[in-house]
Image (spheres, rainbow, N blue to C red):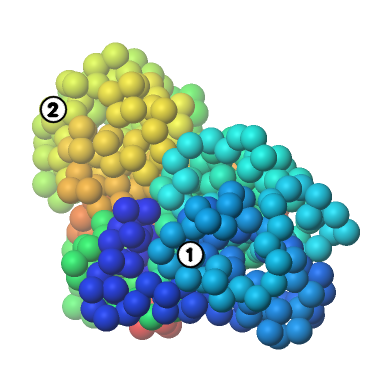
Amino acid sequence: MDELLSVAEMYRADQLAMAAGVSGPALMEAAGAAVVHAVCERWAPHPTAVLCGPGNNGGDGFVIARLLLEAGWPVRLALLGTRSALTGDAAVAADRWPGPIEAADPYILKGNPLVIDALFGAGLSRPLDGIARAIVEAMDGRTVVAVDVPSGLHGDSGRVLGAAPQASLTVTFFRRKPGHVLLPGRTLCGEVVVADIGIPDRVLDSINPRTAVNGPSLWRHRFPWPALDGHKYARGHAVVLGGGRMTGAARLASLAALRIGAGLVTVACPPEAFAVYAAGCPSVIVDPVGDVEAFARLLGDQRKNAVLLGPGAGRGPQTHAAVMEALDAGKACVLDADALTSFADASDELFDRLGGRCVLTPHEGEFARLFGDSVGMDGDKLSRVRAAAARSGAVVLLKGADSVVAAPDGRAVVNVNAPPDLATAGTGDVLAGMVLGLLAQGMDGFEAACTAVWLHGEAGRAFGPGLISDDLPAALPGVLKALKAQG
């Protein structure tokens, strides 16, 4: 159930299920029963307000209210709009409700009942206003169970349209939507339960979803575990371009590349910084490189097959030129930090040289400087990263608590396992080094980025509070051991 379905794809799933013989009222009954089951697992019967909207989400609410009433719960039902305006399956569900229908108004929340929010689903496309917004704002501080998504939350983007309540529990159906995992939607949904309501899994063959929640099921079969007959050169020789002042960034990245399995790692650094790098990890090779021409000669060794440029490298023409040399040499490349910013005014020059074995790892600021309005900066995160990958021709990993990875062919994942402890200096350098190490071992750019960002999150979770970036490479062996034990 890793697939994420857009609102349009979920509508399509409903249509395909009905075409296969599952009736609309049956789907609505199953959805309502799933919510009631989740509620009864978590709470004992107590006063409950079921808030129904004018569409099918409201129809789910009528089913929920009826089933809770039959289970002995004290229930009040309020409808936004009029009963006569309901149509289709929602009207059928309303006909089966035996109790009174009150007008939706914040007063129904007096007495602090459990609130079942069935006002609006993921398909809401305009900001809430008027009485709808007043009701949603009145939910503040109450225990809310959201049907599909908290009302006011956009299902595709995770953005709030005017207002949205903080749910304790969200019950959605068949598959999650991007809004359940992108911020701020992920925090507003609370616990998310995905319920089976009778939609056959085979409908996915027709939908062919291109978005998923990142996890080992997507890339475990391609992870480059060492082979019995292998050797260090078979595991790749990664190169990290080190800077002369911010030396910690390249050192963190090089150690991460080694820990994730690269056979050899060389830091190419300015001669004046050689002593600093050489005094670091003895497993890392240090090569003094005085200028771009010397760097190009270093890359002439065909065994050096993957290069990371950017962490601590410094912004400007030297880094710009080094990036072009690495791309011209045909190496798999990870471009991060200063390597990206050095092309802020020359993005087309960069994009003309990139390919699928190149991975860009910006944070939001670097992303905006490199891509600007060309990818619709007002759009949601998934759309922006997809557009950036298509425009650049490279894999793009936009970092954050909800990191998104997109490939030029439209595939995308949202990563959800990163703990807040990762918000500290240097963790992005470690992530870039992990991507580098996987590229050196032969993974393609999309799989390398997906694998690295998930393992990065797991390493952060394994270490826990007090994490600093130095701790991540040391945590990787335990995470890799657990991954291998899973098969």
Residue at 48% of width from left, 65% of height from top?
A: 91
Is label 1 in a helix, a strand or a loop? Answer: helix
Residue beneath disc 2: 352
Q: Position of residue 155 (x, y in %)?
A: 45, 50
Instruction: Give the residue furthest to the front.
Output: 84
Q: CA distance from mark 2 to mark 1?
A: 53 Å
* Relative vertical location of residue 155 with respect to residue 333 in this rendering, above or below: below
* Relative vertical location of residue 278 with respect to residue 445 in this rendering, above or below: above
Q: Are dots 2 and 1 in contact, CB under 8 Å?
A: no
Amino acid bearing label 2: Asp
* Relative vertical location of residue 214 with respect to residue 188 in this rendering, above or below: below
Q: Quadrant of residue 230?
A: bottom left
* Relative vertical location of residue 287 with respect to residue 264 in this rendering, above or below: above
Q: Nearer the viewer, residue 375 or 325?
A: 375
Residue at 71% of width from left, 40% of height from top?
A: 134
Q: Nearer the viewer, residue 270 or 136?
A: 136
Q: Is residue 250 visible?
A: no
Residue beneath disc 1: 90
Residue at 32% of width from left, 79% of height from top?
A: 22
Q: Nearer the viewer, residue 390 or 48?
A: 48
Circle nearer the N terminus (2, 1)? 1
Is label 2 in a helix, a strand or a loop? Answer: loop
Residue at 56% of width from left, 45% of height from top?
A: 152
Q: Is residue 123 left or right of residue 331?
A: right
Q: Position of residue 21 (x, y in %)?
A: 27, 81
Instruction: Give the residue furthest to the right.
Output: 111
Amino acid bearing label 1: Ala
Q: Quadrant of residue 267?
A: top left
Q: Is residue 427 left or right of residue 244?
A: right
